[in-house]
Image: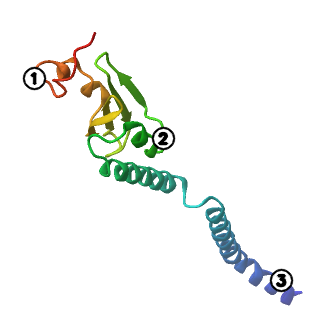
Amino acid sequence: MAAAALGLAALSGCAPMLTGQMAGAGYRAASSSLESVWGAPAAESADAQALARQKRMQAVLNSVDVGQDAPAIVQRMGEAPIQKSGNARGFTCYEYAAVYSATEAAVIVAKDGRVVFFGNSRCAAEMADANFRADGKYAGGPEPL
């Protein structure tokens, strides 16, 4: 009986160690299998997706030249602009959020379907009335009817 008690005491002393090792092994197995199903952890995945989106959109903008067909460029951006605005002078502005950074947007400004400006800006700034007056950025275009 003493031998049985001694054996039980020896096994119970090992139980926490075995339980901890088994729990750790179980956690690692579950963790790796979940990552293989869902990919990287959510925060890393979201950051990677945002960075991939920024790079894709920047690549499109880096290939743009003034005078190109604006609707084709908008289509190549791969998503709808967050804002599309126009004015009576025939200018249209397409704005895409978080292209140059998390807070810096990109715009494509077009006149008669052709790109006249693209880059780091916002439609509110580009479509300001001052840009269309005598010494404005887009001056020289036809006056509205």
Q: What amino acid type should be assigned to the residue bearing mark 2?
A: Glu
Q: Quadrant of the N terminus?
A: bottom right
Q: Quadrant of the C terminus?
A: top left
Q: What amino acid type should be assigned to the residue bearing mark 3?
A: Ala
Query: Is residue 6 depicted above or below 94 in this figure?
Result: below
Q: Are marks 1 and 2 in contact (CB under 8 Å)?
A: no
Residue 66, position in %: x, y? Answer: 26, 41
- Please name whichever residue, 138 or 18, is drawn nearer the observer in this view of the structure: 138
Q: What amino acid type should be assigned to the residue bearing mark 1?
A: Asp
Report crowding for label 3: few under 14, some 14 to 19, many 20 or more residues within 10 A (C-alpha): few
**In front: mark 3 or mark 1?**
1
- What's the residue at 37%, 41% (across, down)? 98
Report crowding for label 2: few under 14, some 14 to 19, many 20 or more residues within 10 A (C-alpha): few
Which residue matches tag 2? 79
N-terminal of the two: label 3 or label 1?
3
Q: Which image quarter: residue 81?
A: top left
N-terminal of the two: label 3 or label 2?
3
Q: Secondary structure at mark 1?
A: loop
Report crowding for label 1: few under 14, some 14 to 19, many 20 or more residues within 10 A (C-alpha): few
